[in-house]
Image (cartoon, grey):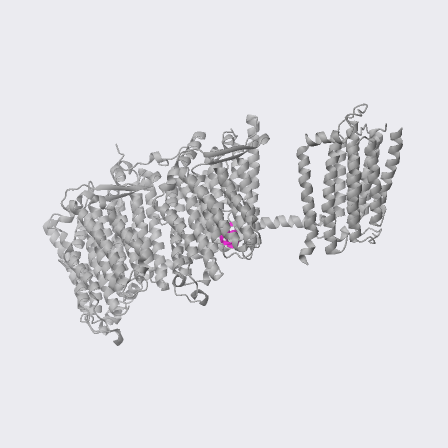
């Protein structure tokens, strides 16, 4: 099956190509089903190919495809190891469900087939990223998912906000990519290759001095861009302008986790730089609490989920920064399940409310759309970290690992714990505001449960969110064993073996989650006037959170506006004035000299004749006088 | 002796013609003066045994070219006489100065200079070597100078074409 | 074969000239049809070209014996892609010129002469011959801008001509100087590249000649601060002129630096690395920054050229395998993408008769296909992996880093800036709701226009995912350039600058 | 046997007269005739010098000059006619469009 692995990328790519050129001849639902079939088949191929890993038999293998840039040793090659397999399964699995959901969600859109073209293209790009056998090919996927993100955020191109958000996402990502690219330069200059195997084998001997730290920090910049970490997270909330399935697939489940994946993949490099790892963890922790606090006060249902995603990505960074790679990947996986579920549920709600996203105008939807409500409740509980749902296990493992690491990580652990509390609070707030209480929507809205094609993926994801955490519990470390071949020779931070400590830590986690959830329920179960007063009592903090700390304005004031001023000065003063002025100045000087001697040219041919004759006389005289 | 007499007569004719060209106010007279000069120079060619060139001078120059001149004079108008006074400032002053310099210089060179008109001239003239018969001219013309000859053919063609284009120019506009 | 390649466009031009001026409908199709022949021949040449160092299919005929001037043509991996690119773009540029409504015959003739000049310049192995082609090509371009341009065409055409001619004059002086040195040292005259490269120049003379050549080519590239003629020329030129100018003419500069400066003055080239690289990096950043705020689409693309060509120069003077490969392949890439962008701007202009970004908005709604192509080319230009622009930029950056680490890091900023200026322009022109009445009733691309863009788009993808197609042919020649420099000087290519340094997966042990 | 110097002196005189006429007259036709005068003077020097040097090439050169002069006259007169048609004048002083 491994020989057919290329099909995993080729199928969605082919689907995208087919829909791109012939999509307009395919009627509406069919094109969506085609796209879903493409990625679904990819899932099955990947699943079959991954069987040997489940059996714990196979070694990672590299599958060459063709030469790409031989001067850099960068070729198209796939690496099939447990980490890649897991990522592939998550991407294709969750991706398939979201594809199916989108068939319902995008119903009636005039560019229906185009949406699925881009969605399939995204799947192919993301799979390229995770299956890549070297950093160059990873970078290919890395940039292509950025492209798809751009295309899909800006899918409703007639909305100026969507177009601006798409551009912002791409540009901010590019800033991260710059760091990543410089990291790649250092990698290439150090190892003379991009291939994982070539780099990791020689990491110990080549990474001297601060090289590992440099690479680690530069990769962190790239990862922070893609995974929306401080200070580059600002694009993700805006990215919610895209259709909701896009938010679920790209901006929750898959693309944004690429940064985590890269750091996990580069574990053999981070092995040699505890400093960079610590920075990764610190950035993650800071982002986690920062974004969680913003999520508390958002009114837009998708914005809450967006900041929640940023926060959860911070958790993953916290894990991989603590070298708890398995925990990070584990959380990546469970997060993909429950956050996709939450986004799709939010999409279902938005769909039902005729594109209303303000939670203040929702409420009481439980009865109108029970399936969505229940599945979202499962997702919310999973996110909050209530056992035995998926989020509990992964989050708890991260916190436990950080605690076990000790030192500075105690501090990070406390931040994580507080974040867990905030998380439970805001997601409960979201669910209560949307589904409970009195209806706050206008009469004509007519909310309704979504069609089967949308609810079935919700149910499937809810099931995954429910049981997904069981793959790696302290009682049964299936995932850890599964991933072992990918992290051979890398130190992995584990939670402590001491069952008592473990139990206390778990208890604290549960306590934080329960406290947050309980507070959220109690605060928002009450009538609107009461919870409004509750929010007002936190002023001015609440307002700051609602404004997301004004970071966008800050960036605008400190970077965008001065940047534009600079560009204008360069273009209109310096370039037009100085550089081109010098050029035209030379022209003017020459013309001035011409003006000075032009009276000599009277225009009378006989004047010229006299000069001519005089000249001839001089020449002849000179010759007669003996020449030279 | 014959040569001396012919030289004196022809030289006088040529100078007289030249002066007429310059001084005559009516271009017709100038043309007649030029004709005289051309004939006189042709005589000097014959004296120096340049038979073919003399013949060509008479046929082409005195014949064809002068006819062309006369045609153009007729076309433009015979009655267009030129005023004597100069209207370019200082033109005559400059011309006079340059001419004076030339004459003074020539006189100076002739009187004081150790000057040979034709520096490498050898003694007695070999009549046969410079006898410009048709055959004698034709031989170098079609051997050593054949490329130049072809080039002049091209030049004449272009000149004819150019003259036609220039003449057509006005008609197109009308 | 190469002689035929140079002469085919000339023959085509003569054939077009022979068609009576009244048959206006014939000239353009005839020109397009005839320009297919050079393309076919160049394609065949590409096919039969052996991936090896050294010149192939050399045609050498004595032209003027006493001065040692020869009609001396040859092709190698550096010139081959440029020749193919030229022959490819000429038919496309011609076919994009249907909106030209006056003196169409002359236009076709000039374009074909331009093609001949370009091909000749790329293939010349004799410096005198090169100079002749280098200059000859200015004349048709001057007329193309000056006759068929927009309002300030005369100014732009004069600026273009004088600026370029100024550089060429310096180069001519240096060429003559080299030839005289050859006479001094060997007793016989020669303008052949190989002969002159073998000269033993004093340091001062070599630097002087290098500077003369470098300025001539820097103007052509154009390298900061010699770039101001470019935006003017581009803005005023008709679409075909802009396409050929950006796609091919500018490449003469980068090509010349690589072909002549490296070969003739290896020592001075090595000494000049810091200067050229700094200018290149300034060009990258400066061109990009200035492009951000341009109000005119064409000017924006023109400044983007300044930025992109900086990468080529940087790669060239990094003198590493990756850098040189990247430079040569980026020559092609920039030709394809920027050529296509100019085509697209021309198509927009044909519809709206304006190039001001502020006059547009929401075009994606009315002309989705055009918008799609524009976005595609935009991303190719930004350097999205999987498309061709990435290959060039990535090779250049990765190749330059071992040699010039800090400069390369700064240059990488250009990649971010490219995203900003191009996507911002795209946002303003194509997205949103079309709010101006003129923009609401535009017609989308016709089949003809799609046929023009499709081959470019296809090539962009093909090069992006299988650059080996070009790299295989390029590499031996670029390696030969590095070998030449290393042999002639004490320059050491920093690891891992050479292909041999690269660790291929699985070759351990 | 007349010394070659006399021929040369005659030619020089003819040339000078032609040159002065060229500079002093403003009728384009007359100026043209003066040019012919100067050409004849030069032709005469060539033939005389050729004889003095025992060489026929002088005559061949004159032959060419005659042809070139004929071509020049044809084009020159055509230009004069063209100018006259447009400007109704043959005076060169009225043609000073090329003033700097």
Q: Residue furthest top?
A: B123
Q: Which residues are magenta?
A: C230-241
Q: Is residue C311 magenta?
A: no
Residue A186 in percent (x, y) is at: 33, 41
Marks counted in the figure total 0
Q: Is residue A277 left or right of residue C223?
A: left
Q: Which image quadrant is residue B38 in?
A: top right
Q: Position of residue A607 (x, y in %)?
A: 76, 47
Can residue B109 be seen at all in this image of the molecule? yes
Q: Is residue C70 left or right of residue A37?
A: right
Q: Residue furthest bottom?
A: A443
Give B89 or A27, whichever is nearer the viewer: A27
**Would you identify the image quadrant in which residue D32 lies?**
top right
The residue at the point 72 percent across, 40 percent down is: D68
**Vertical relation: A598 (above or below) C80:** below
Relative to the observer, which residue lies in front, A348 or C408? A348
Q: What quarter of the picture does the C terminus of chain A occupy? A: top right
* Location of residue A206 in the rendering, given as x and y in whole percent from the top left corner: 29, 37
Quadrant position of the N terminus of chain A in the picture: top left
Judge by depth and name the residue closer to the eye, C247 or C207: C247
Residue B6 is situated, as x and y percent measured from the top left of the image, at: 87, 33
Residue A410 shows up from this direction:
no
Magenta segment main secondary structure: helix
Relative side of C156 to C386, left or right: right
Does residue D36 lie above or below A424 as drawn?
Answer: above
């Amino acid at each position: 099956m491994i020989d057919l692995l290329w099909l995993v990328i080729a199928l969605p790519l082919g689907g995208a190509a087919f829909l791109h050129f012939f999509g307009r001849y395919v009627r509406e639902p069919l094109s969506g089903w085609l796209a879903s079939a493409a990625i679904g088949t990819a899932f099955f191929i990947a699943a079959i190919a991954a069987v040997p890993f489940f059996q714990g038999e196979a070694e990672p293998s590299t599958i060459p495809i063709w030469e790409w840039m031989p001067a850099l040793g960068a070729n198209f090659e796939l690496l099939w190891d447990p980490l890649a397999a897991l990522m592939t399964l998550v991407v294709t699995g969750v991706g398939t469900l979201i594809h199916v959901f989108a068939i319902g969600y995008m119903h009636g859109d005039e560019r229906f087939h185009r949406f699925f073209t881009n969605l399939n293209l995204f799947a192919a790009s993301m799979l390229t990223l995770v299956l890549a056998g070297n950093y160059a090919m990873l970078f290919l996927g890395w940039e292509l998912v950025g492209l798809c993100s751009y295309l899909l955020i800006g899918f409703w191109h007639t909305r100026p906000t969507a177009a601006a958000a798409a551009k912002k996402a791409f540009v901010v990502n590019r800033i991260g990519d710059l760091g990543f690219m410089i990291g790649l330069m250092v990698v290439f200059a150090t190892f003379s290759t991009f291939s994982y195997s070539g780099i990791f084998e020689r990491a110990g001997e080549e990474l001297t001095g601060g090289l590992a730290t440099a690479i680690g920090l530069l990769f962190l910049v790239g990862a922070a861009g893609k995974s929306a970490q401080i200070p580059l997270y600002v694009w993700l909330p805006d990215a919610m302008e895209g259709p909701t399935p896009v938010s679920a697939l790209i901006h929750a489940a898959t693309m944004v986790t690429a940064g985590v994946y890269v750091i996990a993949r580069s574990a053999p490099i981070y092995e040699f730089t505890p400093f960079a790892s610590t920075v990764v963890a610190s950035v993650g922790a800071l982002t986690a609490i920062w974004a969680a606090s913003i999520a508390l006060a958002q009114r837009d249902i998708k914005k809450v989920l967006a900041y929640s995603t940023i926060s959860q990505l911070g958790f993953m960074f916290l894990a991989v920064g603590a070298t708890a790679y398995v925990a990070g990947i584990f959380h990546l996986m469970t997060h993909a399940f429950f956050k996709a579920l939450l986004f799709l549920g939010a999409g279902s709600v938005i769909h039902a409310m005729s594109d209303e996203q303000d939670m203040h105008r929702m409420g009481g939807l439980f009865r109108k759309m029970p399936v969505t409500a229940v599945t979202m409740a499962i997702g919310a509980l999973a996110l909050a970290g209530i056992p035995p749902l998926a989020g509990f296990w992964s989050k708890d493992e991260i916190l436990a690992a950080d605690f076990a690491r000790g030192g500075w990580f105690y501090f990070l652990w406390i931040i994580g714990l507080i974040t867990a509390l905030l998380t439970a609070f805001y997601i409960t707030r979201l669910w209560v505001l949307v589904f409970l209480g009195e209806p706050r929507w206008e009469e004509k809205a007519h909310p309704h449960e979504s069609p089967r094609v949308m609810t079935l993926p919700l149910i499937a994801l809810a099931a995954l969110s429910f049981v997904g955490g069981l793959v790696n519990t302290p009682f049964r470390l299936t995932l850890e064993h599964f991933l072992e071949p990918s992290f051979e020779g890398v130190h992995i931070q584990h939670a402590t073996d001491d069952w008592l400590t473990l139990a206390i830590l778990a208890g604290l986690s549960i306590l934080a989650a329960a406290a947050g959830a309980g507070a959220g329920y109690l605060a928002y179960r009450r009538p609107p006037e009461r919870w409004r007063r509750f929010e007002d009592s936190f002023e001015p903090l609440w307002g700051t959170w609602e404004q997301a700390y004004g970071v966008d304005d800050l960036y605008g004031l400190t970077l965008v506006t001065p940047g534009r001023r600079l560009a204008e000065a360069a273009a209109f003063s310096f370039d037009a004035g100085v550089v081109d002025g010098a050029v035209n100045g030379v022209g003017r000087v020459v013309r001035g000299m011409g003006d000075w001697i032009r009276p000599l040219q009277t225009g009378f041919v006989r004047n010229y004749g006299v000069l001519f004759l005089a000249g001839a006389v001089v020449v002849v005289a000179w010759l007669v006088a003996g020449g030279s | 002796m014959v040569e001396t007499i012919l030289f004196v007569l022809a030289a006088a004719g040529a100078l007289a013609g030249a002066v007429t060209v310059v001084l005559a106010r009516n271009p017709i007279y100038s043309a007649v003066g030029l004709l005289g000069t051309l004939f006189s120079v042709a005589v000097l060619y014959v004296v120096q045994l340049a038979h073919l060139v003399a013949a060509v001078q008479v046929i082409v120059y005195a014949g064809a070219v002068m006819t062309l001149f006369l045609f153009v004079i007729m076309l433009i108008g015979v009655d267009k006489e030129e005023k004597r006074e100069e209207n370019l400032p200082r033109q005559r002053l400059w011309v006079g100065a340059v001419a004076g310099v030339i004459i003074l210089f020539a006189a100076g060179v002739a009187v004081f200079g150790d000057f040979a008109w034709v520096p490498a001239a050898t003694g007695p003239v070999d009549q046969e070597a410079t006898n410009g018969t048709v055959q004698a001219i034709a031989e170098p013309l079609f051997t050593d100078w054949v490329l130049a000859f072809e080039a002049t053919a091209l030049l004449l063609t272009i000149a004819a074409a150019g003259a036609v284009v220039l003449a057509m120019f006005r008609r197109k506009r009308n | 074969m190469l002689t035929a390649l140079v002469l085919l466009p000339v023959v085509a031009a003569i054939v077009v000239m022979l068609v009576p001026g009244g048959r206006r409908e014939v000239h353009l199709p005839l020109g397009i049809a005839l320009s297919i022949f050079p393309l076919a021949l160049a394609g065949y040449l590409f096919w039969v070209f052996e991936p090896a160092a050294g010149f192939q299919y050399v045609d050498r005929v004595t032209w003027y014996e006493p001065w040692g001037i020869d009609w001396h043509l040859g092709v190698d991996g550096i010139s081959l892609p440029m020749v193919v690119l030229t022959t490819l773009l000429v038919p496309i540029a011609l076919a994009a010129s249907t909106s030209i409504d006056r003196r169409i015959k002359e236009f076709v003739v000039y374009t074909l002469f331009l093609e001949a000049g370009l091909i000749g310049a790329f293939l010349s192995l004799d410096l005198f011959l090169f100079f002749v082609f280098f200059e000859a090509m200015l004349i048709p371009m001057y007329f193309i801008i000056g006759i068929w341009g927009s309002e300030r065409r005369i100014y732009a055409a004069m600026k273009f001509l004088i600026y370029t001619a100024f550089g060429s004059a310096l180069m001519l002086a240096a060429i003559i100087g080299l030839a005289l040195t050859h006479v001094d040292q060997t007793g016989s005259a020669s303008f052949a590249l190989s002969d002159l490269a073998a000269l033993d120049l004093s340091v001062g003379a070599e630097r002087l000649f290098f500077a003369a050549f470098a300025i001539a080519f820097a103007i052509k590239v154009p390298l900061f601060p010699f770039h101001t003629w470019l935006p003017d020329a581009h803005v005023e030129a008709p679409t075909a002129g802009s396409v050929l100018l950006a796609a091919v003419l500018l490449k003469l500069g980068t090509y010349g630096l690589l072909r002549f400066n490296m070969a003739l003055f290896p020592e001075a080239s090595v000494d000049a690395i810091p200067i050229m690289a700094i200018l290149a990096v300034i060009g990258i950043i400066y061109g990009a920054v200035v492009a951000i705020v341009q109000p005119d689409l064409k000017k924006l693309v023109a400044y983007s050229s300044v930025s992109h060509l900086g990468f080529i120069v940087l790669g060239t003077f990094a003198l590493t395998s990756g850098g040189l490969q990247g430079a040569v392949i980026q020559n092609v890439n920039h030709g394809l993408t920027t050529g296509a962008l100019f085509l697209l701007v021309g198509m927009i202009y044909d519809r709206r008769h304006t190039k001001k970004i502020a006059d547009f908005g929401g075009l994606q709604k009315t002309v989705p296909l055009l918008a799609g192509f524009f976005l595609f080319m935009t991303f190719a230009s930004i350097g999205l992996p999987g498309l061709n622009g990435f290959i060039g930029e990535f090779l250049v950056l990765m190749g330059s880093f071992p040699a010039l680490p800090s400069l390369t890091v700064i240059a990488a900023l250009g990649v971010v800036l490219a995203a900003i200026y191009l996507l911002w322009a795209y946002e303003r022109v194509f997205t949103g709701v079309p709010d101006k009445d003129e923009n609401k009733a535009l017609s989308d691309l016709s089949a003809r226009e799609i046929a023009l863009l499709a081959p470019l788009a296809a090539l962009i993808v093909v090069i992006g995912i299988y650059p080996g197609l070009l790299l295989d042919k390029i590499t031996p020649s670029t390696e030969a350039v590095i070998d030449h420099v290393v042999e002639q000087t004490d320059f050491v290519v920093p690891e891992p600058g050479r292909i041999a340094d690269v660790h291929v997966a699985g070759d351990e042990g | 046997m007349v010394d070659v110097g006399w021929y040369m002196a005659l030619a020089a005189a003819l040339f000078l007269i032609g040159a002065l006429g060229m500079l002093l007259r403003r009728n384009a036709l007359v100026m043209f005739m003066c040019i012919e005068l100067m050409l004849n003077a030069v032709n005469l020097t060539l033939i005389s010098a050729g004889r003095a040097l025992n060489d026929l090439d002088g005559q061949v050169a004159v032959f060419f000059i005659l042809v070139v002069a004929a071509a020049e006259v044809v084009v020159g007169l055509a230009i004069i006619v063209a100018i006259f048609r447009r400007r109704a004048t043959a005076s060169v002083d009225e043609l000073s469009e090329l003033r700097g």
